[in-house]
Amino acid sequence: MVMELNKDQRVMSEEDTKPQDPNPRLASEGYSVLLDVNDGDRLVFARLSGGAILKIGNKNYSLKPLIGAPFGSLFQVESGEDGSFLSRILPVKQENNSNNVMDDSRDNRELVDNNEAQNLTGEEIEAMRREGAKGDEIIEALIANSKTFDKKTQLSQEKYLLKKQKKYAPKLLLRRPFSRSICEAYFKKYPARIGFLRVDALSLLLTMANVTAYSDVLVVDMVGGLVTGAVAERLGGTGYVCNTYKGSSPYPVEMVRMFNFTDKVLERIVQSSINELSSANTASPEENNQQKVCIAENNINETATSDIMVEETTVTAEARVVDNVVPESKIIKAPKAGAKASKETIEMWRENGFSSLIMAAQDQDPWSLLKDVLPLLSYSAPFAIYHQYLQPLATCMHKLQQEKMAINLQITEPWLREYQVLPSRSHPHMQMSSFGGYVLSGIRISTT
């Protein structure tokens, strides 16, 4: 009995000494993060390190205080002896005084904007900054020296405070990059890079393709890796995500690095060309040998040229997205995803087929790709195709009906409306996207 207890204790001690993965809820060093400056005014992707710097306004701020902070933390610019820095703040719960909104009888009709309402000069504000005054203290001084602040309505006062806060006390929200936040950030800043794929269209793709655990999903991703990362995130290290392509070089999937995937998840993201996946077993041995020689030559050329091109594309794309982030001398790179699929795995897919297909090829005709990729699916497997325009999907749907290759075909246009919810002024947003592309979905059937 004593020996059994000692054995259990030894097992527990061995488990305690094993290295554990970093907490995914904390922004560890080397993690990719999404920085939300002033409530959506700027969205910046950055990789945390001791020497990373973010430029806000005309000053640079170190991102070192963000290391180890939980995602969702709020930071504010403060002044100290060594200059301005980012300091974490805890949000204070404010009481909802709805009666003030209803009973406020003031208006702005008698207010004249002649730049004479503020007694505090710019030189005095700079002197307060040099003395180490915080942003909130400067805002309070501006309110105290304003001749018209008390005469404004409550809504105008809130707008005034928000405007001054963005200028003198900018805030920074630390967000975790995942499929929704990455898609929303790119759709707001660089929508053309993701083919104008909105977040509701992305979720519809995953649903229509029935992406579940232990699925083998075939992906044609020409939107920078957003779809590949979203599928891998939903699989959670189970099944496979195979990114296929035409030609000798794969499509760049640099966005996968922003998801902070573990090694277990990255091992499940592979790539293989359409020729390798669709090489028929009925071909003669001589043709198979010729195909293997051609594939080997293409692989040699890829190691010499293609990898370099993909690496350069990754670096330049991250540099544009991160825009104002300056890395330290020792750059911490995220692990690269999309290794070559093994021969055993390819043979398994040739024999059993993939469980689903997702296509997001904005620069290609859907039918020209689908007629080569659809036979790689198993029978009764669902597929979903995204395109920015309706006509290419309508043509593809007509071809599928003529060839009798799929059933349950439908084209869906996702629709999304955002609302502003505030006391006594809840309404749809005035500026929002009215177009989210189209999704063609269906189920593959046997043609015989």
Image (tube, rainbow, N blue to C red):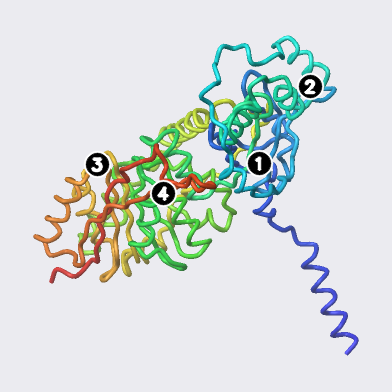
Q: Are marks 1 and 2 in contact (CB under 8 Å)?
A: no
Q: Which mark is residue 47?
A: none
Residue 325 visible (yes or no): no
Question: What is the x, y in percent for residue 447?
Answer: 14, 68
Three-letter residue code for mark 4: Val
Q: Which residue is mark 4?
A: 199
Of residues 332 and 425, the one drawn nearer to the viewer in this rendering: 425
How many neighbours does mark 1 have within 10 angstroms: few (below 14), some (14-19), or many (20 or more)? some
- Mark closest to the chain's N terminus, 3 or 1: 1
Q: Is residue 71 visible?
A: yes
* Inter-mark Cα distance, 2 to 4: 40 Å
Disc 3 residue crowd, few under 14, some 14–19, many 20+, Cα 10 Å: few
Earlier in the chain: of badge 3 and badge 2, it is 2
330 above or below 11? Answer: above
Q: Label 4, label 1: how many angstroms apart (C-alpha)?
A: 26 Å
- Disc ID at residue 30: 1
Position of residue 350 in the picture relative to residue 314 (left or right): left
| Marks 3/1: CA–CA distance | 35 Å
Q: Residues within 10 Å of mark 4 (few under 14, many from 20)?
A: many
For disc 3, the marked residue is 364
Q: Considering only order in the chain, which callout, 4 or 2, is on the residue closer to the N terminus?
A: 2
Which residue is found at the position 56% from the left and 11% from the top?
A: 114
Residue furthest right as drawn: 2
- The amino acid at mark 3 is Gln
